Amino acid sequence: MADATLLQIENAGRVFGGGRTLFGAKKPAVHAVQDVSFRVRKGETLGVVGESGCGKSTLARMIVGLDAPTGGRIVFDGRDLVAEAGRDLRRLSREVQYVFQDPVASLNPRKTIRTILEAPLIHLLGLDKAARERRLGELMDAVNLAPEFLDRYPHEFSGGQAQRIGIARALAADPRLIVLDEPVSALDVSVQAQVLNILDDLKDRFGLTYIFISHDLSVVESVSDRVAVMYFGRLVEIGPGRSVFRAPRHPYTHLLLQSAPAPGRRALISEDANTELPDPYNPPPGCAFHARCPRGTDVCTAKIPPLEAMPGDADHRAACFHPHEAR
Ligand SMILES: Nc1ncnc2c1ncn2[C@@H]1O[C@H](COP(=O)(O)OP(=O)(O)OP(=O)(O)O)[C@@H](O)[C@H]1O
């Protein structure tokens, strides 16, 4: 079924800090991710965009089990990952893999590519020597790297090649979902297209589903079936890429797209925008965007808007009391 759910996030949250000191004083808390719910369908690419600090990486780390939610559920193919993983989050599921932003730093400099790629084949799949050799060849081929590179070390590769190895390592576990956290942001623009093409090809070839996190709007627009927009730890809009980019409903998404350069040029979310973000240790009441919002009214300072389906488009949801009209 084309529309089957692979991953369901239900009211997920992650608080850092908090609690009390030995003397009973309250420690400051940051709600990095708050009450986030969405689903990812089998075979789709869901893009996740938002400014630096909006919680994208924390959300990604929770999905792959590198971090534990402090609230809510993460259900993968009907299994509650948090409950099943118990304390040993790292052993979560080989079916959900992660590709990091910094390709070179994410590879152990003292290990050859062979050792790096063999680890999941041995520990997660339990393959024997002959099957591993075969699989190593397939993996290198899948990311367009010559097999003789297997005996080299990470520092011998360019950024783009290193990211292809990072992708091969994720693929080695034979995953169904790959969370790509800013996978091309550290690469030159000319190399980005190469890596994006490989990702696109692998998706079809291996029947993968992607969550693609980026602050580069043009990249997200080009790769995503659906797009989720985060602001200050919350999901503020989600819908088909076409409607989110052409007719955004949330005033924050509007602002993001308005401030992006003309099509064809790189559309990065401006770092300056961060200076206008609320203080995470002292969040405003109501909608966190209200101070920047041209459509805000009293209700926006009093209540947090729920994420709701937009009239006439059940697949497009926004968390706003005064959303823009469909075009
Ligand atoms: N380990 C931590 N301890 C304390 N606060 C944290 C921790 N990790 C993240 N945060 C805070 O949580 C919020 C969300 O951070 P996160 O890194 O998830 O955002 P992001 O959108 O991925 O940003 P970036 O693009 O800069 O990585 C920020 O306010 C950040 O300072």
Image (spheres, rainbow, N blue to C red):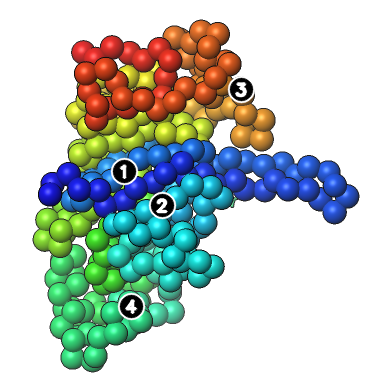
| Residue 307 location (% of width, % of height) | 40, 28
Residue 299, above or below 12 = above
Q: Which mark, by number, is residue 39?
A: 1
In the rendered structure, the answer to whether residue 223 lies left or right of residue 54 reads left
User: Quarter of the image holding residue 128?
Assistant: bottom left
Inspect the image, locate mark 1, and give the three-letter code of the amino acid beneath it. Answer: Arg
Q: Quadrant of ligand 1?
A: top right
- Residue 206: % across, % down: 15, 62
Residue 287 horizontal side relative to residue 199, left or right: right
**Above-or-below relation of 285 to 82:** above
Which one is in front, 43 or 3? Answer: 3
Within 10 angstroms of label 3, few (less than 14), some, or many (20 or more) residues? Answer: few
- What is the crowding at mark 1: few (fewer than 14 residues within 10 Å), some, or many (at least 20)? some
Which dot marks residue 74? 2
Q: Which mark is residue 124?
A: 4
Using the numbered discs, state the Cα–Cα distance from disc 2 to disc 3 in whole angstroms: 27 Å
| Residue plotted at (52% across, 23% down) | 304
In the rendered image, which quarter is residue 137 located in? bottom left
Farthest residue toward the bottom?
A: 129
Mark 1–mark 3 CB contact (< 8 Å): no
